[in-house]
């Protein structure tokens, strides 16, 4: 039996001293909270700090685990050829430590948003659902199983 293949990714809800949330604008998903794939040999915290810095220019400290997510659907990537396997994503609350807002190869804009404005700016259904988990966080980690293609559908949603 071949070893299973999953993409492991991390996302960060970065707050500044004004309790605003950091969002970055991407080509395919619009405004999102920063994050991305964990590279081989990299731990989750280092991957998240790296991704936030690369996408936004902001230095961060990782504070708390908020949610664990499985995108159990498989679909074709934006290139129309590559099959994207199941994803496991872990979202964390983070604190901004410094740095200067910037853009990257993956982002066209970055900015600080009031929490309600951030919810309005995020249009991708899965990202919006995960951001809502952050807004509703009461100390229990959330677990959600969903698919994004052909339509966003939550298959399981519970606290763990």
Image (cartoon, helix red, strand yellow):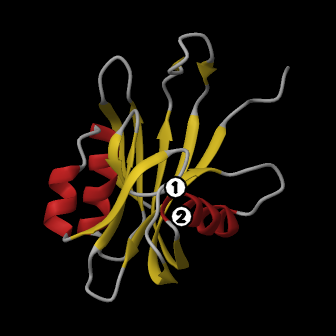
Q: Residue furthest top?
A: 81
The image shows residue 118 at horizontal and vertical percentages of 22, 60
The image shows residue 122 at horizontal and vertical percentages of 25, 48
Task: Residue at 54% x, 21% y: name it.
Answer: 77
Q: Is residue 7 above or below residue 76?
A: below
| Mark 2 residue crowding within 10 angstroms, few (<14) / some (14–19) / many (20+) | many
Q: Is residue 154 above or below residue 82?
A: below
Q: Which mark is residue 59?
A: none
Q: Which mark is residue 52?
A: 2
Task: Residue at 53% x, 64% y: name it.
Answer: 52
Q: Is residue 149 above or below residue 70?
A: above
Marks 1 and 2, Cα distance to the nearest angstrom?
6 Å
Task: Residue at 29% x, 75% y: name it.
Answer: 138
| Mark 1 residue crowding within 10 angstroms, few (<14) / some (14–19) / many (20+) | many
Q: Is residue 46 above or below residue 104?
A: below
Q: Residue furthest bottom?
A: 17
Is the C terminus in the top left, top right, bottom left or bottom right quadrant?
A: bottom left
Task: Residue at 25% x, 67% y: name it.
Answer: 135
The image quadrant that residue 131 belongs to is: bottom left
Is 127 positioned to the left or the right of 37 in the image? Answer: left
User: Which residue is under mark 1?
Assistant: 35
The image shows residue 143 at horizontal and vertical percentages of 43, 53
Are the two marked residues, 1 and 2, in contact with CB atoms closer than 8 angstroms? Answer: yes
Q: Earlier in the sequence, mark 1 or mark 2?
A: 1
Q: Secondary structure at mark 1?
A: strand
């Amino acid at each position: 039996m071949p070893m299973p293949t999953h993409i492991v990714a991390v996302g960060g809800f970065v707050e500044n001293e004004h309790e605003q949330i950091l969002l970055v604008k991407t080509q395919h998903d619009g405004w999102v909270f920063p994050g991305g794939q964990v590279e081989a040999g990299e731990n989750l915290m280092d991957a998240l700090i790296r991704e936030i810095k690369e996408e936004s220019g902001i230095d961060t400290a990782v504070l708390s685990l908020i949610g664990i997510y499985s995108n159990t659907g498989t679909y074709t990537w934006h290139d129309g050829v590559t099959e994207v396997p199941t994803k496991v994503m872990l979202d964390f609350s983070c604190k901004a430590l410094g740095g200067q807002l910037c853009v990257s190869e993956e982002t066209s804009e970055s900015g600080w948003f009031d929490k309600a404005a951030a919810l309005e700016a995020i249009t991708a259904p899965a990202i919006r659902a995960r951001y809502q988990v952050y807004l509703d966080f009461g100390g229990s980690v959330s677990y959600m199983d969903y698919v994004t293609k052909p339509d966003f559908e939550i298959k399981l949603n519970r606290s763990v």
